[in-house]
């Protein structure tokens, strides 16, 4: 496979990139941090300007990379592969935010835990042969055997556990990764290929603002990692975790969060059910947040879950006067959520 030299103009960083490798993949493996989010071609946060040379735009969708942008030499680093040596420049500012980054790597492991934890939801724990350092809130990709398909799942364990990764997988009817693998043939002891870490979502350094974490379904996974890490390291002065489901069958790990709530005066766990009356909070998780806070000014929020929930949460937080720069969203979309929303990966989950 031929390789090309890629140079980042402002940082002066040079890497070698194979003609079948994305520019983002090449730089992250060298531990050169480029802005990115979803690695699915859907968030647009990895846009680069190609100042010299030619790229293949790959599967970049037109709603993320418009024909006009292509004309201007803009490409998506997560989708583009080189056709020549390149000089490129990220569109987003690459600044040192003080967060320690970890290089992207290929690893192998085996399944040590496989359990049903909620409606159509399984916990998969993979023991790696080598450590994979990551930040709380990041995700990894698992290869679906025999398909060439990789699927993204957030690590739910704290980053102090680098050899043992916990994932929460929600079933998509007919999905390649779920009905075709995790909910069909996958068994304890099976080998798994893992690629990671990826993504910028999460809490990895101390912050002054209280944080509201709003999760829907398996959007709880990165929040679990963040809560465990933030409490262990004392990163956040006040931490609120909201987990939304339709009925009690959708909630999981409640005993753990209730125990943390009892142990840590500044941690508050609020499970919410939208279709069942119970002794906890009832209603859409975003409506419960709206009722609970008269103002969110001076607070931050982390959102992960179905796109409709994330959008509704953004509106609620704006209504409660949270600064938009303090609202963080997981940019990759779970395949089950995309399928439910009729999104671009709906047929390939
Ligand atoms: S579009 Fe490339 S990281 Fe999201």
Image (cartoon, rainbow, N blue to C red):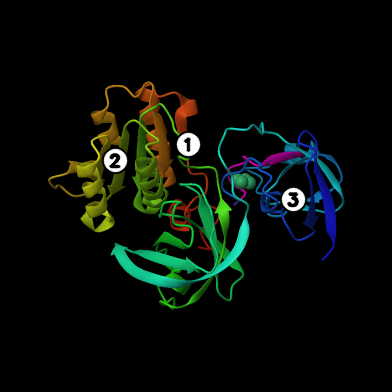
* Distance (Cα) linking label 3 and label 2: 39 Å
Q: Which residue does the image show at 87% across and 45% down from the upper left?
A: 53
Mark 2 CB lies closer than 8 A to ligand 1: no
| Quadrant into which the N terminus falls | bottom right
Q: Which residue is mark 3?
A: 57
What is the x, y in percent for residue 217?
Answer: 35, 52
1 vs 2, front mark: 1
Q: Would you identify the image quadrant in which residue 309 lies?
A: top left
Q: Is residue 134 above or below residue 72?
A: below
Mark sitting on residue 205: 1
Q: Neighbour class for label 1 at 10 Å: few (<14), some, many (≥20)?
A: some
Q: Which residue does the image show at 58% across and 65% down from the upper left?
A: 107
Residues at circles 3 and 2 in contact by the CB criterion of under 8 Å: no
What is the x, y in percent for residue 179?
Answer: 43, 71
Q: Neighbour class for label 3 at 10 Å: few (<14), some, many (≥20)?
A: some
* Distance (Cα) linking label 1 and label 3: 35 Å
Q: Would you identify the image quadrant in which residue 340 lies?
A: bottom left
Q: Which residue does the image show at 57% across and 57% down from the upper left?
A: 196
Q: Is residue 305 visible?
A: no
Q: Is residue 141 above or below residue 220?
A: below
Please state the extent of the stretch shown in magenta in the rendering: 40-49
Q: Which residue is mark 2?
A: 285
* Magenta residues, dominant SS class: loop
């Amino acid at each position: 496979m031929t390789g090309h030299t890629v140079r980042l103009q402002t940082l002066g960083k040079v890497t070698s990139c194979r003609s079948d490798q994305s520019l983002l993949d090449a730089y992250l493996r060298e531990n050169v941090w480029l802005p990115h989010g979803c690695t699915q071609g859907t968030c647009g946060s990895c846009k680069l300007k190609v100042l010299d040379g030619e790229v293949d735009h790959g599967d970049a969708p037109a709603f993320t990379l418009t024909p006009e942008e292509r004309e201007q030499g803009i490409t998506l680093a997560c989708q583009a592969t080189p056709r020549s040596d390149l000089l490129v420049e990220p569109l987003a500012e690459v600044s040192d935010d003080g967060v320690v980054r970890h290089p992207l790597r290929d690893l192998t492991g085996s399944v040590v835990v496989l359990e049903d934890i909620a409606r159509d939801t399984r916990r998969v724990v993979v023991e790696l042969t080598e450590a994979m350092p990551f930040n709380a809130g990041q995700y990894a990709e698992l290869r679906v055997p025999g398909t060439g398909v990789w699927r993204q799942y957030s690590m739910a364990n704290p980053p102090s556990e680098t050899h043992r990764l916990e994932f929460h997988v929600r079933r998509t009817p007919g999905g390649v990764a779920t009905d075709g693998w995790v909910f069909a043939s996958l068994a304890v002891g099976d080998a798994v290929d893992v690629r990671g870490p990826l993504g910028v979502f999460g809490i990895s350094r101390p912050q002054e603002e209280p944080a509201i974490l709003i999760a829907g379904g398996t959007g709880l996974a990165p929040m679990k990692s963040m809560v465990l890490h933030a409490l262990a390291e004392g990163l956040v002065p006040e931490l609120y975790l909201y987990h939304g489901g339709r009925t009690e069958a959708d909630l999981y790990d409640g005993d753990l969060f209730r125990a943390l709530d009892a142990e840590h005066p500044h941690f508050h766990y609020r499970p919410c059910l939208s279709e069942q009356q119970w002794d906890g909070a009832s209603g859409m998780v975003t409506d419960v947040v709206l009722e609970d806070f008269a103002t969110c000014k001076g607070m931050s929020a982390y959102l992960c879950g179905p796109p409709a929930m994330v959008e509704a949460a953004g509106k609620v937080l704006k209504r409660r006067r949270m600064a938009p720069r303090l609202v963080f969203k997981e940019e990759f979309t779970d395949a089950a959520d995309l399928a439910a929303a009729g999104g671009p990966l709906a047929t390939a989950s």
